[in-house]
Amino acid sequence: MPDPIEQYRKQQLYRRVYEKRVEAIAARQICLSRDNALREEIERNMKSFVATSLQCRYRGWKGRCIAACKRQRRNAAIAISRIIPCPLCKSICSHDPVTGEILGPGETQQLILQQAKEAKEELHRQKEEALYVGDFHARDKSFDGLGELIYVNGGRYAGQWKDNRRQGKGIYQSADGYEYIGDWVDGRKHGVGIQTLSSGERYIGHFVEGKLHGTGVYYAANGDRYEADGEVYKGHWERDYRHGTGVCFYPNGAVYSGEWWRGRWSGNGIYVSSEGIKYIGTFSKDKQHGKGKLLFENGDVFDGHFVHGVAQGSGKTKGIYRFYDSGNVYVGDWVANKRHGNGTYTFVGGSSYTGAFIDDHVGGR
């Protein structure tokens, strides 16, 4: 019969051996995991290094291609600028770019066709040098469907294509940080989109043929729409100008709501300054101009005419100023925001003074 004490001793020995083996296996697993993580990190770094090196070489080569393309465009622009009206046939003639001689209408047409052919070949060359990944048309192998194109200047477009043009929904990003997300028609921004400039300014709204046009919201780089700690515009646009009706919140707390003309206050509108002064009336070139009313923070009210931002008027355009605290009223002439000329000052008790005012004082006193 086996000794129980000896059996117990063997069991304890086997247990210790087993625990040591488990610890060794766990330590080995930790080492393998650490080695695997280190290997993966090295592989990532190598891939990043290779990609960066290839990109640097690619951009250097593309930079030389861009410089050559710019030179060709400049030469084409010089040739176009030499086109002049022929005094004899009244048709469009031009100078030969080599000899300088005047070419007739037929020769000029041939020159134009040759330049168009060269431009088409240049576009084809640029397409070949760019990198495109996506769908092609089965017939003519043009970009058609979904795809991404990396341009020679470092920009890239990812989205829908039609006949080699950006058409539909897509995202364009330039090398300097510009980004547009939205609708495209015939290769241009057209429809609803979000445009972010490299400076941080952002526009959300409508575009027509590549320009801001229609209803949209503009966000300045240093603020947003809700906190109003930056310039925010919501309204209509026309060819990149604030044009039509819109409201703008300024960084200092001022607000303008009304009509715009080519980016400036023009027409009927309401302006509230950062000090709480409110103006209701007409504007011209960002200034109060014409009939308007000023409501001051202390309750005073001026109703009259303005010229280039200052109260000015006499006769039929005289102004009325009502003092809130005293209840007194002045009706008369104004010059450069001051009572100046003939006027009537009526006290709340009913008495009044009618006569001359100079520099906001009765008779100059």
Image (cartoon, grey):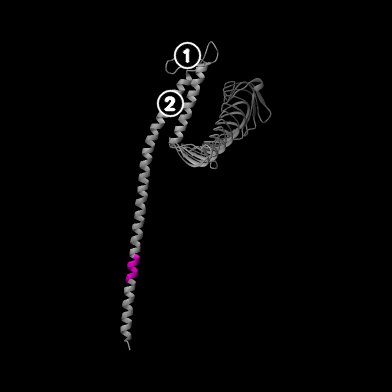
Could you classify mark 2 by the number of other residues whose Cα lies within 10 Å: few (under 14), some (14-19), or many (20 or more)?
Answer: some
Q: Which residues are magenta?
A: 20-26
Residue at x 36% of width, y 44% of height: 50
**Image quarter hosting the C terminus:** top right
Quarter-of-image position of residue 240: top right
Q: In the image, residue 338 lies at what x, y percent? A: 58, 24
25 magenta-colored: yes
Q: Which mark is residue 183?
A: none
Magenta includes 135? Answer: no
Residue 44 lies, with reference to residue 128, above or below; the image says below
The percent coordinates of residue 308 (x first, y second) are 57, 24
The residue where tag 1 is placed is 102
Give the amino acid type for the residue marked by disc 1 in the picture.
Ile
Q: Residue at x 51, y 20 (%)?
A: 109
Tag 1–tag 2 contact (CB < 8 Å): no
Disc 2 designates what residue?
72
Q: Is residue 280 visible?
A: no
| Residue 152 point in image, percent of width and height | 43, 35
Residue shown at 45%/30% (left/top)? Answer: 122
Residue at image coords 31%, 81%: 9
- For the residues labelled 1 and 2, the Cα–Cα distance comes to 22 Å
Q: Quadrant of residue 337?
A: top right
N-terminal label among 1 and 2? 2
Secondary element at image label 2: helix
Q: Is residue 77 left or right of residue 249?
A: left
User: Which amino acid does the dot numbered 2 rest on?
Assistant: Gln
Secondary structure mainly formed by the magenta segment: helix
Q: Residues within 10 Å of mark 1 (few under 14, many from 20)?
A: some
Q: Is residue 192 above or below residue 266?
A: below
